[in-house]
Amino acid sequence: MSIRHGLLALLSGGPRYGYQLRVEFEASTGATWPLNIGQVYTTLSRLERDGLVAPGGADDQGRTLYAITEAGREELATWFATPVGQTDRPRDELVIKIAMAVAAADVDVAGVILAQRMATMRTLQELTRAKRGVADGAAQRLVLDSMIFKAEAEQRWLDHCEAVLKERKA
Amino acid sequence: MSVLEMREVTRTFGDVPALRGVTLAVGRGELLAVMGPSGSGKSTLLNLAGGLDRPTSGSVSVEGADLASVRDLAALRRGGIGYVFQDLNLIPSLTAAENVMLPRELDGVRAGRAREEAEAALREVGADEVAGRFPGELSGGQRQRVAIARALVGERCLLLADEPTGALDTATGDDILRLLRERCDAGAAVLLVTHEPRYAAWADRVVYLRDGRVADSTAEALESAR
Ligand SMILES: Nc1ncnc2c1ncn2[C@@H]1O[C@H](COP(=O)(O)OP(=O)(O)OP(=O)(O)O)[C@@H](O)[C@H]1O
Ligand SMILES: [Mg+2]
């Protein structure tokens, strides 16, 4: 994904200036994706070059407002309509670590699994605390939920590893 | 003082050692989650904590009272302990509301008030519209909510819940955990058995059971949460 499409999505709700885009972007992603203001302006100028946004005057404090163009709306619709692929994910270090622990001699695999499980559980606890703190803001909550589901999948996979390895030893 | 304290508890069924020396404590306002593979002793632990079963050795005390020396265990259970059973245990010939009222009526609360409390508890778990139905007329998730309402009704110092989210979708499961958490914040101690990490993560502390023993616990996280 791109910051590009995130900014287009925010602009589809009406013209905004740069700093406002940054604040709204962080709020709707539950502050899991911090942006600096430089990134916002670089992205806006590329969007402008591509005809997807246009500067639309200034607000009463002289800040330049940007508006989405018709081409921008089409681009956004295409983005929402296109599923995200699984292919370009980076290799998962944990998977490789466990695989190597099983393959190598003299590694306490159960110990590696347990340590990882405790660490992942602590992450889950932190994410859940953050979620409890979200008063209203469905977008933020759903971003945290997504991270919770991913951490949970990792926990389940670790349980599975433990069970499979136990079976093989028995 | 801890609400629940278990010391070196063992429980053996015939020659099956279900628990082999478990020590743990749950304080007021604390939510403790117990995880572990099937057969690791989770339900056994909960039954002992609620005085539904007796340890082979070791001691269990609730609010400072050693369960081995409590004469009227049933009264202690009804008065201070709310229990959500893994298989729910709703009485089929009573409506949802009557199931929730039952523990209060046994406590001697008069029917009118017991009904009001039951209705409030059913509302809390989002099951008020099924109050008049029998368990056989409810979906699995609705039955589960009624069983949770029954555990919440009245003043409980200790809530014991065995897989209370088993039949619920994840959004509803979150609502139930939020409820249990609120009870904690109001001063109750909660012991939650779950195999779902997302729900265990609501706890202050997570204990892993394996083969009847505590394999590990996130004790540090508790310290930093306080
Ligand atoms: N009443 C009983 N009589 C004989 N054995 C029992 C009894 N209750 C439990 N057990 C045994 O004790 C062990 C622990 O059982 P327990 O029900 O506590 O497991 P659990 O962790 O709750 O599992 P699950 O996740 O499947 O509910 C198992 O080996 C079980 O067969
Ligand atoms: Mg069980």
Image (cartoon, coloured by chain):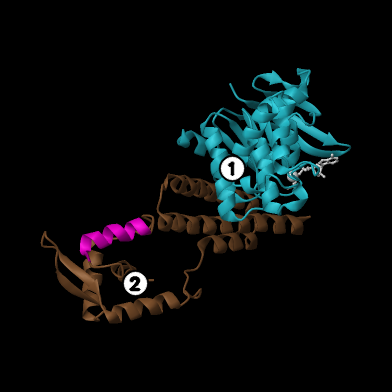
Chain colours: A brown, B cyan
Give the position of the C terminus of chain A as an image quadrant. bottom right
Q: Quadrant of residue B160?
A: top right
| Residue B218 in view, yes or no | no
Q: Is residue A17 magenta?
A: yes
* Amino acid type at image mark 1: Arg
Front in this rendered view, residue A106 or A158: A158
Q: Quadrant of residue A64?
A: bottom left
Front in this rendered view, residue A2 or B216: A2
Is B215 displayed left or right of A96 in the figure?
right
Is A145 displayed left or right of B72 in the figure?
left
> Where residue B205 appears, x then y in whole percent?
56, 38
* Amino acid type at image mark 2: His
List the residue tagged with mark 2.
A5
Chain holding disc 2: A
Alpha-carbon span between mark 1 and mark 2:
42 Å
List the residue tagged with mark 1.
B123
| Residue B125 in view, yes or no | yes
